[in-house]
Image (cartoon, grey):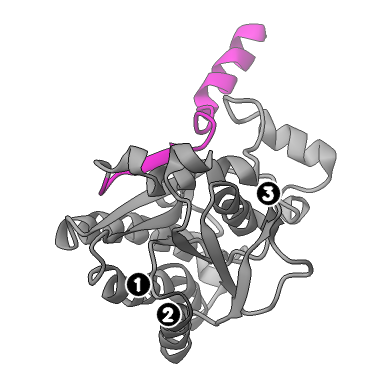
């Protein structure tokens, strides 16, 4: 994959790259030949590695502007370049709108929208000076394209992130390409927290046309594609990685009526 993707010798930063989807993305970039830096508030339980190579870990709380500035200045100093930024860090607890104060919802917005904005601005300051420019990949969600009950602020942030990426793609062209991966459900080590035991995961998977949840490495392969020379003319785009989306509820309701 390294020769095909054209990422050998390039440097990629993956935020939230120590576990789950982020680690899957980081490993895909390692397999594609890139040097990889992962950042998170806490170090990984084990080094993020693939293909005999290991990602470098740098601690950072991306909600703090000083931490963002220090992270990217450290990358510039140590590596002299930045070719790819994957804005993956994010997440949310389940919290119905009326049960949380505005400040709690604002913290979700800060992590999932403002932090990627800060990281992208810092990355752009490096990428715009490079003859080869750079590439930014936003990790979005289907929660940003439909109602998101229980995670309203997260859905709003992801909708804003996708729009932000399209604007960045216009303002920063042609030096920096910006695209979004719109993810559906992914099977990570934390899947049980969202979907329950194996029976719960299987029940949720049956709602996906593909019949299963995505694996982190599959998200990683999509990110590698968007960062590669094969996607050189793709910018301002949203790539759906959701296994066909969600089966419309009315179809099951209709089938139930027919069976009676």
Give the position of the C terminus as an image quadrant. Answer: top right
Rendered residue at 35%/70% (across/down):
120
Circle on res. 51:
3
Name the residue nearer the viewer: 42 or 150.
Answer: 42
Q: Label 1, on which residue?
A: 123
Secondary structure at numbered mark 1:
helix
Quadrant of residue 96 within the rendered picture: bottom right
Residue extent of the magenta highlight: 235-260
Secondary structure at numbered mark 2:
helix
Q: Earlier in the sequence, mark 1 or mark 3?
A: 3
Secondary structure at numbered mark 3:
loop
Q: Earlier in the sequence, mark 2 or mark 1?
A: 2
Does the magenta segment cover residue 236? yes
User: Could you classify mark 1 by the number of other residues whose Cα lies within 10 Å: few (under 14), some (14-19), or many (20 or more)?
Assistant: many
199 lies left or right of 231: right
71 is higher (above) or lower (below) than 38: below
Rendered residue at 57%/52% (across/down):
25
Estimate the spatial distance between the alpha carbons at disc 2 and disc 1, rounded to whole Å.
7 Å
């Amino acid at each position: 994959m390294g020769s095909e993707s054209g990422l050998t010798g390039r440097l990629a930063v993956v935020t939230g790259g120590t576990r789950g989807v982020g680690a899957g993305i980081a490993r895909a970039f390692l397999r594609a030949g890139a040097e990889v830096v992962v950042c998170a508030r806490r170090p990984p339980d084990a080094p993020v590695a693939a293909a005999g190579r290991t990602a470098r870990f740098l601690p950072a709380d991306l909600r703090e502007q000083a931490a963002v500035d220090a992270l990217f200045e450290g990358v510039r100093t140590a590596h002299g370049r930045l070719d790819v930024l994957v804005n993956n860090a994010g997440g949310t607890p389940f919290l119905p709108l009326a049960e949380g104060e505005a400040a709690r919802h604002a913290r979700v917005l800060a992590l999932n929208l403002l932090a990627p904005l800060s990281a992208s601005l810092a990355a752009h300051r490096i990428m715009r000076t490079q003859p080869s420019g750079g590439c930014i990949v936003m990790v979005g969600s289907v929660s940003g394209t439909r109602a998101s009950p229980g995670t309203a602020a997260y859905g709003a942030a992801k909708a804003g992130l996708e729009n932000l990426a399209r604007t960045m793609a216009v303002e920063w062209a042609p030096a920096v390409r910006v695209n979004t991966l719109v993810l559906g459900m992914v099977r990570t080590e934390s899947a049980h927290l969202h979907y329950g035991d194996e029976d719960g995961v299987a029940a949720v998977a049956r709602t996906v046309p593909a019949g299963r949840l995505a694996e982190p490495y599959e998200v990683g392969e999509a990110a590698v594609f968007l960062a590669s020379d094969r996607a050189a003319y793709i910018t301002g785009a949203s790539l759906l990685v959701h296994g066909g989306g969600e089966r419309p509820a009315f179809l099951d309701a209709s089938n139930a009526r027919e069976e009676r």
